[in-house]
Amino acid sequence: MRRKRAVYFVVLPRHVYIHVPFCARRCTYCDFSIAVRRVVPVEEYTTALGRELDLRFGDRAKWEVDTLYFGGGTPSRLGGDGVRRMLDVVLGRVDLAQNAEVTLEANPEDVTPDAVHAWRESGVNRLSIGAQSFHDNVLTWMHRTHDAEAIGRAVETAREGAFTNFSLDLIFALPQHIARSWEADVEAALELDPPHLSLYGLTVEPRTPLGRSRARGELRESPDERYESEFVHAHEALTSAGFEHYEVSNFGRGGLHSRHNSAYWTGAAYAGLGPSAHEFDGRTRRWNVAAYTEWLRRLEAEQDPLDESEDLTSDNRLAEEVYLGLRTRRGLSLIRSDEPRIRMWIDAGWATRESADRVVLTPHGWLRLDALAADLTHVRSYY
Ligand code: SF4
């Protein structure tokens, strides 16, 4: 029997995330919801995605969105024609606003001239390229499918295909036994002159190949000092090169920010489609079943792939407002009860006051983001 979602967007969201789960193999640090496939089932996936769109929004008129984000997994594994087919399906339900941002996550080896041409023609205008490191030994250790040279080739190919808006992802704070110079990696990224970079510290999750190595005592994570010094080095090198450190993990040049991710950080509503995709309507978070096969099975049976939902309580909202404000360069609007804490943070070098009523964390504050956000939330919850 056909079941629809219990809760719909009252106002249709201006931002849409689509999860494309396919990867050639699992990277050692990855705990994302992925489906390892040698051959990507483009037709099967895009047909199911069309079904989910119909099930969710079939009785609503087409609506306009400001950002579309294809994340994964590795959406670029759909290839040129596969991404074209996916865009056809999605654009059957939504219209792109003028100057809409359409991002595709890509692994370097998939960024070929033909694919870039097809992506551009079908409406993609931003690439997020998973570089991770420019050291071949690191890429091998991570079980990545590309070598360092492929990153430079991907950037060149993207540029030749008129992608001026692209980002490179890098991972820092690797275990000490891995021979890697973070300074050299930051330098190599700068040499490619990207307009945007996203930097993530390695976290070893239990249900990953690295997590299992740690459980066997074969892996020791990076000490906190290494995490801190690499984060601060990146901040200094990139801001000196003209980047704005506009969010704890993100740097943009020439005013280019990820508009899709920025929408998350302002608490905007967004729809999420595909296995494991999350969405938020301003009051409730909902997420789909994580396993590709279960998502597919439900949609083939015309059933809702929803897994669970959670209504935000007033405590959740308070915590979220503080956390989202503090993670960005925009900062957080202050209330009177914050003052004693903010003075302490400023004295410690963790924050600066942008104006009488707005505080922004420094890089040293961002290194303590979770603790500072929890602390301020605790203070606010008493008032
Ligand atoms: S390519 Fe990305 S999503 Fe796929 S396994 Fe590696 S890190 Fe995970």
Image: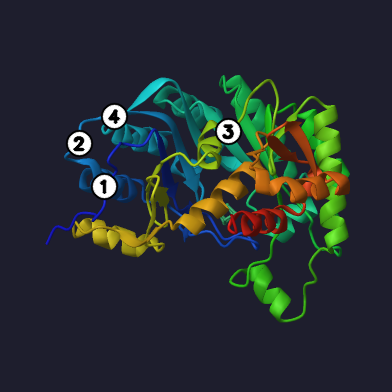
Question: Few, some or many C-alpha atoms within 10 Å of disc 1 (few <14, some 14-19, many ≥20)?
Answer: few
Instruction: Provide the residue designation for mark 2.
Output: 60
**Is residue 293 at least partly visible in the picture?**
yes
Question: Decide: marks 2, 4 in contact (CB < 8 A)?
Answer: yes
Residue 258 numbered mark, or none: 3
- In-front residue for pair 247/87: 247
User: Is 74 placed left or right of 326 in the picture?
Assistant: left
- In-front residue for pair 319/264: 319
Q: Determine the CA span between mark 1 and mark 2.
A: 10 Å
Quarter of the render that holds ligand 1: bottom right
Q: What residue is shown at x 88% (from left), y 59% (from top)?
A: 225
Q: First in sequence: mark 4 or mark 3?
A: 4
| Rendered position, 163 above or below 75 | above
Question: Few, some or many C-alpha atoms within 10 Å of disc 2 (few <14, some 14-19, many ≥20)?
Answer: few
Q: Determine the CA span between mark 4 and mark 3.
A: 22 Å
* Circle 3: residue type: Ser
**Is residue 178 at least partly visible in the picture?**
no
* Circle 4: residue type: Trp
Residue 8 numbered mark, or none: 1
Question: Few, some or many C-alpha atoms within 10 Å of disc 4 (few <14, some 14-19, many ≥20)?
Answer: some
Element carrying mark 1: loop
User: Is 112 placed left or right of 90 in the picture?
Assistant: right
Rendering coords of residue 365 (x, y %): 78, 48
Displayed quadrant of residue 188:
top right
Residue 63 numbered mark, or none: 4
